[in-house]
Image (cartoon, rainbow, N blue to C red):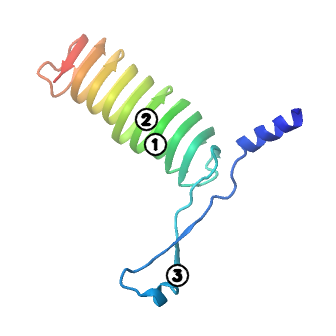
Amino acid sequence: MKKLAIFAAVAALACPIFAQESVIPDIDENLDGDEVENVSAVPRKQYAQWPVFCAISEFPATPDIAGIRITIPFSTKQESVTGIDVGFWGRAQYFEGLQCNIFRNDVKDYGALFQVGCYNSIGHADLIGGQVGLWNESGAIRGFQVGLVNLTGEGQGFQVGIINRAEEFYGFQLGLINIIRDAELQFCPFVNVGF
């Protein structure tokens, strides 16, 4: 029984070495039945097919992951991640789900997610969800930021921290220093409201 449990654990956490590559035919709508048979197949991009995916540094370079990504010590080569990201440092172009890395959570383009870690960032793009950490930053947010320092370009929701700063903000800021650059009252200690 112990051997079976060890085998199951190793199989569940095993790193996929090969990503599946599928093909779809490139078919012109104006072709008749005989011409369709001679059409060549075009390869689609690779994707990971395992529910648990161990990403070690830059291996493997798989564009899309759906499931759980374990980043040891960091991972930068997965373009789109859907699911849960845990470890030390996780980076993706697009992310949907929960990103919970100890040191850094980084999404470059778009995120519909919750980030929990020391340093959370959504590059110059949109975040729908929330960030909880020591330092949180986003290009635009629709949700919340809770941390020591919270920075956003524009936002809707609330910020709770020691320093909260936004260019445009519709919602509440609770903290020691609250700044909304386009508000009538740009700076207000303790509570600031943007509308």
Report helix, strand or loop for mark 2: strand
The first of marks 1 and 2 along the sequence is 1
Disc 2: which residue: 113
Residue type indicated by callout 3? Ser
Mark 1 = which residue? Answer: 95
Q: Distance between the residues labelled 1 and 2?
A: 7 Å
Q: Residue 40 carries which label?
A: 3
How many C-alpha atoms fall within 10 Å of the one at disc 1: few (<14), some, or many (≥20)? many
Looking at the rendered image, the disc whose residue lies closer to the viewer, 1 or 3, is 3
Question: Which quarter of the figure is the N terminus placed in?
Answer: top right
Residue 176 quadrant: top left
Residue 30 horizontal/vertical position (percent): 36, 84
- x then y, percent, for residue 60: 63, 53
Q: How far is disc 2 from disc 3 in space, using C-alphas?
A: 39 Å
Circles 1 and 2, Cβ within 8 Å, touching? The answer is yes
- The outermost residue toward the bottom is 34
Instruction: Determine whether, in the image, residue 62 is placed left or right of residue 181.
Output: right
Q: Residue at x 62, y 61 (%)?
A: 20
| Residue depicted at x 30% and y 14% | 174
Assign the C terminus to one quadrant of the image: top left
Q: Which residue is drawn at 33% across and 28% down?
A: 143
Look at the picture and state if 189 lies above or below 106: above
Q: Between residues 127 and 77, which one lies in front from this camera angle?
A: 127
Q: How many labels does the image show?
A: 3
Which residue is at the front of the view, 173 or 189? Answer: 173
In 3D space, how far apart are the residues under numbered discs 1 and 3 (Cα atoms)? Answer: 33 Å
Q: Which amino acid does label 2 sit on?
A: Leu
